[in-house]
């Protein structure tokens, strides 16, 4: 719960960073596009360094990445509930009809 409070407090701060960092040349839009690769540790070292330098000066992008990280963590903790048997059968019937068209 403390982590959520911290995250919401960070969202309330204004982003003092311009849309594109003059130091890295990395735009906020690029950070959004790279978030999955960043969180999966799949970026090349130089691109990761650029992104982290951007994050050091951009509260908005830092908040965004933390929100995505938190969402992923919360979704992993959800128990997968089995579908009702009739729902499964209805879906299978729809797929069979679609396949036969």
Image (cartoon, grey):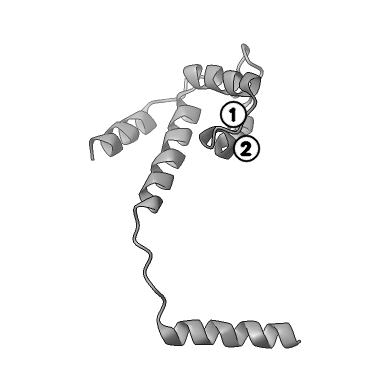
Please tell me in which quadrant of the rendered image residue 98 appears.
bottom right
Task: Decide which of 97, 66 is in the foreground and name it.
Answer: 97
Label 2 neighbour load within 10 Å: few <14, some 14-19, many 20+: few
Q: Give the residue drawn at x 64%, y 31%.
A: 30
Q: Determine whether, in the image, residue 91 is placed left or right of residue 3.
A: right
**Residue farthest right in this picture:** 101
Residue topped by disc 2: 33
Residue 52, how many percent across, how many down?
53, 21
Instruction: Mark yes or no: residue 48 visible.
Output: yes
Q: Give the quarter of the image for residue 24.
A: top right
Name above or below for residue 28 compared with residue 49: below
In the image, which disc is placed on residue 28?
1
First in residue order: circle 2 vs circle 1: 1
Tell me what residue is drawn at x 34 percent, y 34 percent.
Answer: 7
Q: Residue 69's x, y, as percent?
A: 43, 39
How many other residues sit within 10 Å of disc 1, few (<14), some (14-19) or many (≥20)? many
Which residue is drawn at the image coordinates 40% and 81% (left, top)?
Answer: 84
x then y, percent, for residue 22: 63, 13
Closer to the camera: disc 2 or disc 1? Answer: 2
* Picture quarter with the C terminus: bottom right
Helix or strand or loop: what does disc 1 sit on? helix
Q: Secondary structure at mark 2?
A: helix
Whether residue 18 is visible to the viewer of this picture, yes or no, is no
């Amino acid at each position: 719960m403390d982590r959520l409070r911290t995250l919401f407090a960070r969202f309330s701060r204004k982003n003092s960073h311009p849309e594109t960092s003059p130091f890295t040349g990395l735009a906020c839009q690029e950070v959004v596009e790279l978030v999955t690769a960043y969180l999966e540790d799949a970026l090349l070292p130089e691109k990761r360094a650029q992104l982290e330098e951007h994050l050091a000066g951009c509260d908005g992008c830092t908040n965004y990445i933390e929100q995505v990280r938190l969402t992923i963590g919360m979704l992993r903790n959800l128990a997968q509930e089995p579908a009702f048997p009739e729902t499964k059968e209805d879906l299978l019937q729809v797929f069979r009809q679609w396949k036969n068209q």
